[in-house]
Amino acid sequence: MTAHSTTGRSITAEIPLRPRLATDPGELVPELAEVSAALFKAVGNRSIPRATISLVQLRAGQIAGSTYLTVLHTGFLRKAGESEERIASVAAWQDSPYFTAPERAALALAEATLQPNPHGERVSDELYAEVASHYDEKALATLTLAIGQVNFFTAIALIAKPVPGRSFTDPWA
C-alpha cells in the first residue's frame, strides 16, 4: 500500500529538481521586473528592520507551503547573521523566546493575514492595535506591503515552482 498526500502523489516520491514553468516568468512578462523592483524599494525603506521583514516573509513561505520561499528567506536570514535558533523557531514563534515584542506582533499580523479564520475577521481590531503599538504609521504600512510582497511572489513560487536553493535572480537556470 502506498501512502498518498492530498495531491495524489506518493509521499515517498522524489520531487524533481527543476522548475514546473520552464521559462522565468520575468522573461515571459518583462513588466514583472518593474513591479518587483518597486515592491523591493517600498519594503526596503528602512522603517522596519530588514530582519523583521525576512522573519515575516519566512513565516509566510512556511504558511504557504512553499519550499522555494522558505529556503530563500532562510538564506537571507543566514546571510544577515541571524542565529540558527531564531531561524529554526520561526515556525513555532508563539512559544519561542528568540523574538522581540515588535517581531512577535509582525509575525502575528502575517499569520492572521495569510490564514483563514473561521471565527471572524482575519485581522481583528485588537491585533491591529497591538501591532500599531509597536510600529508608527509608515512602518505599519511597510509591514503591510512586506506581507503583500511575499504573498505576490507566493503565487509564482507555488505555480511556477522555481528550484529551491538557487539564486534569487536565477531560479530557472
Image (cartoon, grey):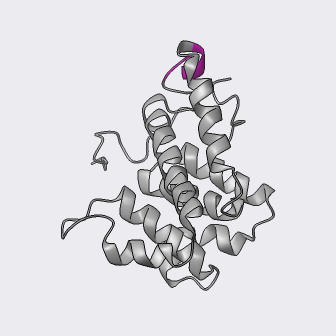
Q: Residue at x 31, y 50 (%)?
A: 3
Asked if residue 25 is among those painted magenta in the image, a careful observer would answer yes
Q: Residue 120 is drawn in which quadrant? A: bottom left
What residue appears at the point 47 percent right and 40 percent down from the top-left corner? 152
| Residue located at (39% from left, 48% from top) | 11
Residue 133 can be seen, yes or no: yes
Instruction: Please identify the quarter of the rendering in which residue 9 is found.
Output: top left
Q: Is residue 122 above or below residue 3?
A: below
Magenta segment: 21-27
Left/right placement of residue 149 relative to residue 129 reads right
Return the residue nearer the eye: 17 or 68: 68
Q: Nearer the viewer, residue 126 or 3?
A: 126
Q: In the rendered image of this protein, does residue 7 appear above or below residue 20?
A: below
* Picture quarter with the C terminus: top right
Q: Position of residue 137 (x, y in %)?
A: 54, 64
**Horizontal side, residue 10 vs residue 76: left or right:** left
Snapshot quadrant of residue 56: bottom right
Picture layout, residue 84 above or below residue 77: below
The one nearer the camera, 121 or 133, is 133
Say above or below: 21 vs 109.
above
Residue 163 located within the stretch drawn in magenta:
no
